[in-house]
Image (cartoon, helix red, strand yellow):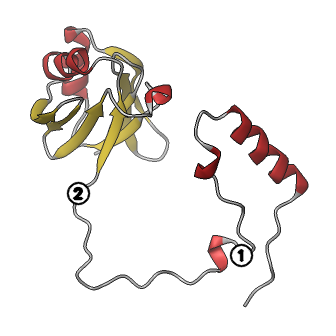
Amino acid sequence: MGAKYLPSKKDLKATQRYQQKSLLPKSTFRKPSATPPAAMPAPKLPASFRPKIAAAIFQVADLDAALAHYKTVLGFTEDFRSGDYAGIKLGDITLHLTSGGDRKQHIGTGGIFVCCETVDAYFADLKKRGAIIRMEPVTTSYGLRDFTIADLDGNHLSFSCKVK
């Protein structure tokens, strides 16, 4: 086994400052491990374990307003709704929205990066519909073209495609 990892005093103080400012219960935080994750062996996953789909969960202040915005401005469709929790779809992606639970202090801190075939036509449509633009389409030095919008609560959605 490799050398033991001990966090520095600076790291511990930064963690303590974060925990003091956090609204989460102190039991949420664990003490730093004596072994860094890089030194641990990778978990052995069952052969049948094959993740296929993931959905980000965005905390919103008003679920009805958020659903209306996602459907009328951003072009999503409602997949399901159960009380203060809903699932929406755009093409093959799924996004979950919730206005309940104990995570209200995190409203507007979500983000998702969506890979597409093209982005310019969708961006033009979003702009016409009054979407909140955070970054207009830009071609990057690493071969992608992307833009970023925000929902009514400030959650960010970035859309990207490879430059052809």
Where in the figure is residue 31, as x and y percent of width and height? 71, 61
In 3D space, how far apart are the residues under numbered discs 2 and 1 (Cα atoms)? 31 Å
**Mark seen at residue 25:** none
> Is the N terminus in the top left, top right, bottom left or bottom right quadrant?
bottom right
Dot 2 alpha-carbon crowd within 10 angstroms: few under 14, some 14 to 19, many 20 or more: few
Residue assigned mark 2: 53
Image position of 13 with respect to 96: above or below:
below
Q: Residue at x 30, y 31 (%)?
A: 98
| Residue 158 in sight from this viewpoint | no
| Vertical order, 5 against 142 (above or below) | below
Residue at the (22%, 37%) spot, across then down: 118
Q: In which quarter of the image is residue 107?
A: top left
Where is residue 145? Give x, y as percent.
Answer: 36, 37
From the viewer's perspective, is 89 left or right of 63?
Answer: left
The answer to whether 2 appears left or right of 107 in the picture is: right
As drawn, the residue found furthest toward the bottom would be: 1
Q: Mark 2 belongs to which amino acid?
A: Ile
Residue 137 percent across, percent down from the top left:
36, 26
* Left or right, 73 with reference to 159: left
Could you tell me which quadrant the C terminus lies in? Answer: top left
Mark 2 or 1: in front is 1
Q: How crowded is mark 1: few (under 14 residues within 10 Å), some or many (20 or more)?
A: some
User: Which residue of the protein is positioned furthest toward the right in this rendering?
Assistant: 9
Mark 1, secondary structure of its residue: loop
Q: What element carries label 2?
A: loop
In this rendering, position of residue 122 left or right of residue 153: left
Q: Residue at x 82, y 52 (%)?
A: 12
Residue topped by disc 1: 35
Q: In the picture, residue 126 is in which quadrant?
A: top left
Q: How many labels does the image show?
A: 2
Q: Nearer the viewer, residue 145 or 45?
A: 45
**Which of the marked residues, 2 or 1, is nearer the chain's N terminus?**
1
